[in-house]
């Protein structure tokens, strides 16, 4: 219960912090931190237009995506307290419920009949395909390290002691952060600001959505960010008491948001053809994390 | 004495490098020739002794050292003739002679080494000296050949080093740390087979650059093509024997261990592929020196088949490399006269050699007969014994395949040589052809007849030395 | 700590596989030199101090400073274009190098030897095969030289694994490194830059069976 409320709380501020950071680094004051939430509320009040070429899929997809992300949030633990739902192998559930949501958004984009959106959908599918082994190998290595298979048990029994486990933790946070950037369609894989056909990936999939659906999709995006931030924070707050854990959690989330903003301000997006190899590189680095875990466990002298 | 030999040789090389006077150059070269011959006699009289802890005058080393001396004397002589005619600058002459002296010394030392790291060091030195020789003409093509040679040999020498590291790992298991071959033989039962496998694989791959087998043979082809012919003769004969020595010594150790059959399999594969590659290239090559080089690869493939087959093959392999050294070097020495006659290296522009230089043409004909192992040549004896060992080892399919490939090689080689000797080139300007002194072919006749004599009627000392060289191998 | 450094070493291999500019290769080689410096310090505790100091000096000066500086000088002097020009796209290179690491890990798993720290074996063989792959899949001669330098780094790692019992092998390895690098880099690339104006392998295919 604690974790999902914290995630919901952080998601309210997350996008705002990113926007604010980007503005300040560009030399402007920028909008208020609650501006994205106000935009979403404005969208909820608007009417929705559905194209004649779309079918039921297009109508239900935003809700399915939102529901899937919400369900995925339920399994994320918070330090020493479980998520709303926790069972063995729930990280596989996590990955695939998110994949279900993504699948629906992809087929909804193709449902519109626009080749523009179809192009974005295919790119999105490609990147998710490459990011999947990275995620699984990463969490799998930590499952191997701690001997448990549910998120809650993995994170609560994770002890970062020797230098190699610190390195593994640092590498894992880096990989997870990069996966978060990919899943949320952020730099350096996808630029949310660009609206040129050549370079759009996620933005193009939601071009035809409007009103309540668009508000739902934006909320989903913010929620996803906070969810991944919570996952990253869980690496570090494993055994702290609730009193310490909550401020550290919020601090790490804010830090994550600021870093995303900084990366978006200072880095250019990768050339489109370099994206697959970048994402695959993440999978290779995850494999090295796996190797490191084997070394730590001495299954491998 | 070994120390004196090495120090004097390196001093002569250094003096040659800095000297610019032609007379002193010739004196130093003759001095080196005498030193080399003297060292060989000394080695023969000190059979089986160990010197400087790292050099042993064992039978294989002695045989190859004698071959080296017999080949290097005409090599030095023909180098002198080559440089005199080509109007060289003193600097290039100095580099050439010091490099060739350095090369011969390093090869001699490597033949006699009994520690794998010492062989490795001297093989590296041969790479350095051979590359200086290849770069002699300093044009674009020579640079390309030198670059390829240096690069591939550097990679191969790194491979040999990795093999040495794995060997030390294998030895660590047995609790020792001395990598000399005697010590390895003493601990042969306790060597870890996994490391030994890896070590043999890497050392074998590394030395194939010098020996001229798949996969690293490519370095040698360009090297023999671009180096001046006398240096090319050395590269094609005694340097290949150096690769053989490196592989043979480690093979003797491996033959007593459980990985013997696996090692034989590796050698079979490499040797067969080498013969195959040589056959393919021989049918389409147009450059005469490259043709000789590919023929060398084919011969080395046959030698390694003999080694892998076992039995009488061991004796035949060593006989073959000695005789091949004589035959191939005589072909290369003859090439210079061929080039002077026609000013071209390509088979297309050379022909009717019999008319312009009958003595040299007979050398080529005899060399062709010897290199393709036809009867009066000693190579016939050794190849026949190798085929017999393949037959006795029940490798019938392999034997048939190799015989087919060799038939194609004989056809290709024969077609080219007979064209060179008898078919006139259309549109050739006969007034431009210089008169070649037939006495220059004398050294080649001597080498070829030595090859024939050693094959058909070997002196008992010779036979005994070879048998002693292979006595450590199984059955 | 050695394990950490060696895993960073493998990450550098992965990074090189997707790099686009030659100067990145040079920087990664310098990084590898620094990593080897650290590993030498941590690993070779059983050999005498004078020898150890010499080896460490060679590693840091030669591998991490002298060779990269010389390489960047060569790149500028010969006006070599700054792109790596591979024959295969970087994506496939990345897959191949990951496969190399995976296969090496599996191979190392089948060894039952307590004398060798397996991580050394994995790192050295991966680097060796990665270096060979670079030589085979890149067009420019200077990348061939860098592939060779990478092979030498791999060999050095392996010699560190046995260096405690046989320090002479580490010395031999250093001798190989210095000798071969000076020979290849110093003499021929200089001359090649003079004779061939663009340092492409394409230019080096004149020696054919004409």
Image (cartoon, coloured by chain):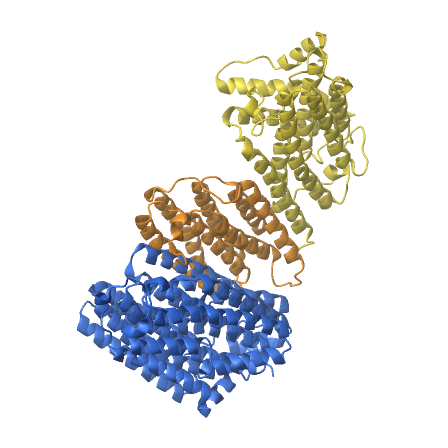
Residue A61 found in image quarter: top right
Name which residue lies at 35% across and 80% down: B69
Chain letter, colour orange: C
Find the residue positioned furthest to the bottom. Answer: B460
* Above or below, comparing residue B52 to residue A239 in the picture: below
Q: Is residue C60 left or right of residue C122?
A: left
Q: Is residue B72 left or right of residue B251?
A: left
Quarter of the image containing the N terminus of chain A? top right
Nearest the eye: A139 or B319: B319
* Above or below, comparing residue B306 to residue B286 in the picture: below
Residue B295 found in image quarter: bottom left
Residue C54 found in image quarter: bottom left
Q: Is residue B417 left or right of residue A240?
A: left
Residue C167 picture location, percent across and down: 49, 64
* Residue B234 appears in the picture as rendered: yes
Name which residue lies at 52% across and 56% down: C157
Residue A181 picture location, percent across and down: 61, 29
* Above or below, comparing residue A175 to residue B219 in the picture: above
* Above or below, comparing residue A264 to residue C186 in the picture: above
Name which residue lies at 30% across and 81% down: B442
* Residue B167 appears in the picture as rendered: no
The colour one sees for chain B in the rendered image is blue
Name which residue lies at 72% across and 37% down: A155
Residue B242 picture location, percent across and down: 44, 72
Nearest the eye: A218 or B381: B381
Chain letter, colour yellow: A
Residue B446 picture location, percent across and down: 34, 83
């Amino acid at each position: 219960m604690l974790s999902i409320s914290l995630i919901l709380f952080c998601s309210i501020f997350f996008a705002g912090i990113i926007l604010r950071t980007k503005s300040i680094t560009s030399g402007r004051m920028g909008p208020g931190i609650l501006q994205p939430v106000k935009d979403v509320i404005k969208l909820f009040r608007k009417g929705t237009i559905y194209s004649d070429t779309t079918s039921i899929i297009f109508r239900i997809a935003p809700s399915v995506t939102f529901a899937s992300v919400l369900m995925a949030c339920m399994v994320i633990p918070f330090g020493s307290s479980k998520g709303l739902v926790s069972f063995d192998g729930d990280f596989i559930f996590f990955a695939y419920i998110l994949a279900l949501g993504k699948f629906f958004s992809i087929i909804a984009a193709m449902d519109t009949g626009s080749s523009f959106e179809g192009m974005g959908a295919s790119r999105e599918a490609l990147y998710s395909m490459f990011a999947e082994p990275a995620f699984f190998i990463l969490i799998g290595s930590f499952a191997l390290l701690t001997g448990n298979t549910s998120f809650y048990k993995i994170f609560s029994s994770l002890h970062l002691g020797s230098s190699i486990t610190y390195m593994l933790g640092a590498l894992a946070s880096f990989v997870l952060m990069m996966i978060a950037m990919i899943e949320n369609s952020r730099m350096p894989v996808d630029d949310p600001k660009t609206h040129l056909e050549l370079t759009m990936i996620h933005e193009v999939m939601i071009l035809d959505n409007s009103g309540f659906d668009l508000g739902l999709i934006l909320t989903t995006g913010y929620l996803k960010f906070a969810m991944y931030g919570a996952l990253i924070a869980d690496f570090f707050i494993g055994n702290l008491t609730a009193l310490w854990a909550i401020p550290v959690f919020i601090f790490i989330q804010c830090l994550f948001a600021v870093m995303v903003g900084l990366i978006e301000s200072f880095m250019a997006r990768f050339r489109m053809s370099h994206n697959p190899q970048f994402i695959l590189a993440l999978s290779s680095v995850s494999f090295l994390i796996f190797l490191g875990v084997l070394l730590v466990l001495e299954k491998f002298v | 004495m070994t120390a004196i030999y090495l120090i004097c040789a390196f001093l002569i090389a250094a003096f040659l490098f800095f000297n610019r006077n032609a007379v002193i150059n010739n004196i130093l070269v003759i001095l080196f020739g005498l030193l080399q011959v003297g060292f060989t006699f000394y080695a023969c009289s000190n059979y089986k002794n160990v010197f400087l802890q790292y050099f042993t005058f064992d039978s294989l080393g002695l045989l190859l050292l004698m071959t080296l001396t017999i080949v290097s004397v005409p090599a030095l002589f023909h180098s002198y003739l080559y440089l005199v005619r080509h109007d060289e600058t003193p600097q290039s002459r100095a580099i050439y002679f010091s490099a060739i002296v350095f090369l011969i010394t390093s090869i001699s030392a490597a033949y006699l080494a009994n520690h794998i790291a010492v062989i490795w060091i001297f093989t590296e030195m041969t790479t350095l000296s051979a590359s200086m020789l290849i770069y002699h003409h300093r044009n674009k093509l020579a640079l390309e050949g030198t670059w390829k040679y240096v690069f591939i040999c550097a990679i191969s020498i790194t491979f040999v080093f990795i093999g040495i590291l794995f060997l030390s790992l294998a030895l660590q298991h047995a609790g020792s740390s001395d990598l000399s071959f005697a010590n390895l033989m003493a601990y042969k039962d306790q060597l870890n087979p996994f490391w030994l496998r890896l070590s043999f694989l890497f050392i074998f791959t590394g030395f194939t650059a010098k020996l001229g087998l798949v996969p690293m043979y490519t370095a040698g082809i360009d090297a023999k093509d671009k180096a001046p012919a006398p240096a090319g003769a050395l590269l094609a004969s005694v340097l290949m024997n150096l690769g053989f020595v490196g592989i043979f010594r480690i093979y003797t150790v491996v033959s007593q261990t459980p990985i013997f059959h696996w090692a034989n399999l590796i050698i079979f594969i490499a040797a067969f592929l080498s013969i195959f590659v040589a056959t393919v290239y021989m049918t389409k090559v147009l450059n005469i020196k490259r043709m000789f080089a590919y023929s060398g690869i084919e011969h080395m493939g046959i030698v390694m088949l003999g080694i892998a087959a076992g039995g009488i093959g061991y004796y035949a392999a060593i006989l073959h490399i000695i005789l091949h050294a004589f035959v191939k070097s005589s072909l290369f020495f003859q090439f210079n006269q061929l080039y002077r006659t026609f000013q071209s290296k390509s088979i297309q522009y050379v022909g009717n050699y019999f008319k312009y230089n009958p003595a040299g043409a007979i050398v080529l004909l005899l060399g062709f007969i010897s290199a393709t192992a036809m009867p009066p040549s000693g190579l016939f004896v050794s190849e026949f014994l190798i085929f017999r060992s393949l037959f006795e080892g029940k490798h019938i399919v392999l034997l048939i395949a190799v015989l087919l490939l060799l038939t194609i090689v004989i056809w290709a080689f024969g077609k080219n040589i007979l064209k060179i000797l008898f078919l006139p080139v259309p549109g050739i300007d006969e007034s431009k052809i210089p008169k070649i002194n037939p006495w220059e072919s004398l050294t080649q006749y001597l080498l070829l007849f030595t090859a024939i004599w050693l094959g058909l009627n070997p002196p008992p000392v010779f036979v005994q030395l070879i048998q002693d060289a292979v006595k450590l191998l199984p059955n | 700590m050695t394990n950490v450094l060696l895993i960073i070493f493998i990450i550098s291999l992965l990074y090189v596989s997707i790099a686009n500019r030659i100067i990145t290769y040079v920087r990664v080689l310098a990084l590898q030199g620094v990593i080897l410096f650290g590993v030498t310090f941590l690993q070779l505790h059983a050999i005498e101090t004078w020898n150890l100091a010499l080896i460490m000096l060679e590693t840091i000066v030669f591998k991490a400073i002298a060779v990269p500086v010389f390489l960047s000088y060569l790149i500028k002097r010969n006006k070599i274009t700054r792109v790596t020009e591979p024959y295969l796209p970087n994506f496939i290179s990345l897959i191949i190098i990951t496969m190399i690491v995976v296969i090496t890990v599996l191979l190392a798993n089948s060894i039952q030897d307590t004398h060798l720290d397996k991580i050394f074996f994995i790192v050295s063989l991966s680097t060796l095969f990665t270096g060979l792959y670079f030589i085979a899949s890149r067009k420019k001669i200077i990348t061939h030289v860098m592939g060779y330098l990478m092979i030498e780094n791999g060999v050095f790692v392996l010699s560190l694994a046995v260096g405690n019992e046989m320090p002479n092998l580490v010395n031999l390895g250093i001798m190989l490194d210095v000798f071969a690098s000076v020979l290849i880099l110093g003499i021929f690339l200089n001359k090649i830059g003079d004779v061939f104006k663009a340092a492409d392998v394409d230019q080096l295919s004149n020696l054919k069976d004409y």
